[in-house]
Amino acid sequence: MKIPLSWLKDYVDFEDTVEGLADKLTFSGVEVEGIERLGGGVAGVVVGEVLAIEKHPNADKLTLCKVNFGGASEMTVVCGAPNVAVGGKYPFAPLGTALPCGITIEKRKVRGVFSEGMLCAEDELGISDNHDGLMVLDAKWAPGTALSEVMGPPETVIEVEITPNRPDCLSLLGIAREVAALYGTKVKAPDTALAESDPAAEQATSVAVEDLNDCPRYTARILRDVKVGPSPDWMKRRLEAAGVRAINNIVDITNYVMLECGQPLHAFDQKLLAEGRIVVRHPKPGEKILTLDGVERALEPQMLVIADAAKPMAVAGVMGGEHSGINETTTDVLLESASFRPAAIRSTSKKLGMLSESAYRFMRGVDAELAEFGSRRAAKLMCELAGAKLLKGVVDVRSAPKQPWTVVCRPARLEALLGVKAVPEEIAKVFESLELKVLRRSPDAIEVQVPTFREDLTREADLIEEYARIYGLKKLPPVRSMATLVPDADDKPAQAQGRLREVLAGLGLQQIMNYSFLAEKLLDLFDKDHAPNRAKLANPLTADHTTMRDALLPQMVETIGLNYSRQVSEVAFFETGRVFRLGPDGKPTEEDHVAAGLSGPVGRMGLDKFRPVDELEMFLWIKGLWEQAAAALNLRGASLRPADRPWSEPGRGMEIVVDGAVVGWLGLLSAGIAKEWRIHEPVGLLEAAAKLLVKDVEAMQALVPPPSFPSIRRDAALIVATGVRHERVLEVARAAAPAELEKVELFDIYQGKNLGEGRKSMAYAFTYRSKAGTLTDEAANGFQEKVNAALKAQLPAEIREG
Amino acid sequence: MDIKEVDGWTAQALSELAGAADGAALEALRVKYIGRNGMLPALMQGLKDVPAADKPAMGQALNRFKTGVTAAVAERKAALEAAAKAAKAGAFDLSLPGRWPRRGRLHPIQQLIDKTSAIFRRMGFTVADGPDVETEYYNFDALNTPADHVSRDVQDTFYLPGGLLLRTQTSAVQARYMESRKPPVRIVCPGRCYRRDTTDATHSANFHQIEGLYVDEKVSLADLKGDIDHFARELMGPGVKSRFRTHFFPFTEPSVEVDFSCHMCGGKGCRVCKQSGWIEIMGAGMVDPNVFKLAGYDPEMVTGYAFGMGIERLAMILFGIDDIRRLYENDVRYLAQF
Ligand SMILES: [Zn+2]
């Protein structure tokens, strides 16, 4: 809302700079969003008319303008503005003028031609930052008119934002009340004394309100002999400074009074109302209305209209109708000043897509007791400015008036809540400055009567806030911060999730974050079977965000695809986030998940990166990532089992089992899905429910001391059929070896022509160690012979010892 | 054999040693001149045939031979070794790129959630958590939001079937937590929130907040000021201050908006703070008595403060991010810089 300061000063006196005022208002809850300075002009600058334009002989971008500025002779001015035109009127600074930008105009040569003055842009006059071209003035101004006359008197406008709890501040008087409280002055209410004449208004019209719940009050005054015409300049300037377009004196007065006191008003041409009377009712089926903006609008039964005896003439509180509006021939005015139920106006305004100044105020709440004041004030101005004759009295249809209520504030409670010392006298003074009537004051309690326009003040806490904001939040005492320790507060689950993220980042993965909702077709691509259990938004905003994610992998692959398309093919990502699935009761359940995605030579370094990555290598990386993460998380009871997923390449998926429950999967992305993002390299993926993965983060296991005796290593290269698996080798070796076999490590796999078709070489290192003493070479040889014999017989294998 | 001859040998040996090209040549010369079967033992052998009168002078000449050659061998050896070392060092390319498999980073939003949570944890707050899918009760009713409040509108809030919704604020955790335990309560709740905003440079339909709640006997607005001041210094630097402006939220009374003095310019005014010297960081206030009543706490017995701030907004301020969408685009070249 825009507040012209000269207008505000009609209602309240205060001694401060505009910046000081803005600061006080902002800290007390009326946020000043901007300060704008209008009008004023610059001494010496006048209206100049360009009579002719010639090209500058020595410069392409400059012109020579003949300017009439009301002086004895015309001046030739060198001008560089792109928008200069013959017949145009612009601010002209004659020789000797000092401009706010620091230039004093002198007769001087510009590229060899004398310039006798200057045509100005807005920035040169200090009006704005605009330097796009000359400031264009209305054609009506005679050359030589002072710019200060064109611009009007100087005005400062502050723009304020009013929070929803303070509809009473949506007016100049409302702001004036705040200013008066902040500066300890009094509000000067405008005059509403009326000169009325016969007959009585109720003989000239009638008002019927069919729904007093939606329209708790409707008042009508009748004015005759109205002369519609333009408003006086002072009123037009004020309206324009407040951001409202001037139309004619009657409409302008309704707007002026609304801005002044917050009461929206509407003026009907009474002769255009069937039977000259008002019926406030809900629309009948099929009823339409042509609103003032020229649009025909269908009305719905729960909306409220202001009708005449026959049909709707206005959408109540939102917008007037085209057919009953004030026009040049209007002589009889029916002045509406009413109040409507906020929720009803909000719903109608939203349905019709119309947010007028009236609707905005009614939505937030207009005090029904304000209707009389607004009506009297507007009627008075219509008598004064439009020569109207006011009929006696007012037709006032209303529900029972709201009575002021009382609230008690205990100074002790105020001190406890704010942490400031306060004496009852001071508290009472603050309340009185806000027009709260102090009924009773004791050291223990201050009882106040709240005026009806402060509907937000119903409880002690509300009064305490009033004290705090007027007392000044800047004066809050600095209290030393103390860490209060709360017994039994436990955030270990949150810390464990943090540990999981640290482990994954420590393993070299970059964390990513994706939205919790996405397009369902992306989820379908990875797992169509889950579709019935997905939670869908009832009111999605875009087609890309319709469904809550039930897995993290689809966006993981999408992210890899995005980076891939930007020529970044080597990435290692993880994401932790919630997934959502419908439970058996049809309600969404949530689970924290973790996902990882690898592409490119993530497990290699340096020059090795330049070889393509094959499927086995990528699979071993994603599996290795899992093994390292599980070990770092101290996870016990975890294993992997071969299991394909709809998204995985056949035979390249495994499920993650923890304590007997399947908690996730890892494997390679199927080539069919990878193609969607034009990825033609293996992609390793992992997704698991996070909770069980971190179950042992805090647990300690019994420590094993480092071994006391040295170990002995024996190597063996097994030549076996290509179908022999590593786990089978381990199984056979372990079964045959004595307890001294500490570990078996695969260190090479080789397939080559020299081995023959269908055969491969697997090289293993066997480490033996005794807990009782240092092993001899002979003993180690004996162990290895046993192992070799078993491998030869059971795999079967040919063995080359190392 | 005379002295002249011996000195001649000495001169020749020194000259040959100085020219020894490598370790092997040097060793051959050493053997030739001072080795067990070399020239020196042979010359020493000849000393006995020298007339007695000449013996002292001859002895000195032989000594010159021995010490001179021995020293020259050592000197040449050191020179050859130094040259070899230099050659080896020169062949070592220090400028080759280093090798280490990978580095990982946390997402900038995660970093700020962790950083803010850590500060509050040191101040005695516990990290609490609640569901993303909420009921209208916890997201609105329990927070004293009027039944017809605009924020409940389908324009602004994402709804799911069955009257559920995606929480619009982490404040929803407050009521759940208070219902489940008795005061005192001192929690922060970082988490994901959702608003039906069209995503643009400064809005994201999916975003993060961190919420704080402290309830006890005699918690005051001045306590909130002290705690927020402390947080401001911890988060943004030792000189940073906070200030309160009166505002309105349904779930607090009094309500304030909190600005931090600009960490970039120290309050003098710069681009980051739009020349004001202050940056709006959070909303806060004293817990509304209605919120306590709904949670089953007696507002006559306890008071409390609550605050909440947007993590994305913090990220934009602290990291200088110009477009919120970059945070969710997940281009690794951007994320890896944080
Ligand atoms: Zn700054």
Image (tube, coloured by chain):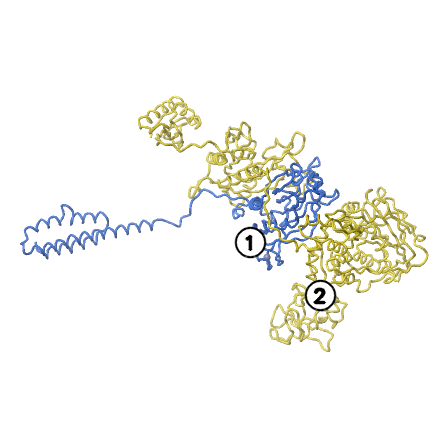
Chain colours: A yellow, B blue
Q: Does B325 sit left or right of A305 as displayed?
A: left
Camera-side residue of A110 and A310: A310
Q: Amino acid at mark 2?
A: Val
Q: Which mark is residue B238?
A: 1
Task: Judge whether A86 appears above or below A408 on screen.
Answer: below
Q: Nearer the viewer, mark 1 or mark 2?
A: 1
Q: Does any portion of residue A315 appear in the rendered image?
A: no
Asked if labels 2 and 1 touch by Cβ distance under 8 angstroms, the answer is no
Are there few (<14), some (14-19), or many (20+) residues within 10 Å of tag 1?
few
- Which chain is disc 1 placed on? B
Q: Residue furthest bottom?
A: A72
Q: Does A133 sit left or right of A407 as displayed?
A: left
Camera-side residue of A59 and B263: B263
Which residue corresponds to mark 2? A136
Place of residue A66 in the rendered image (x, y in percent of width and height, measured from the top left): 69, 73
In space, the residues marked 1 and 2 are separated at their CA atoms by: 52 Å
Quadrant location, ligand no. 1: bottom right
Place of residue A490 in the rendered image (x, y in percent of width and height, measured from the top left): 58, 38
- Snapshot quadrant of residue A563: top right
Place of residue A665 in the rendered image (x, y in percent of width and height, measured from the top left): 54, 32
Secondary structure of the residue carrying tag 2 is loop
Task: Judge whether A518 appears above or below A753 on screen.
Answer: below
- Snapshot quadrant of residue B162: top right
Place of residue B145 in the rendered image (x, y in percent of width and height, measured from the top left): 72, 43
Secondary structure of the residue carrying tag 1 is loop
Q: Which mark is residue B260?
A: none
- Which chain is disc 2 placed on? A
Numbered-mark total: 2
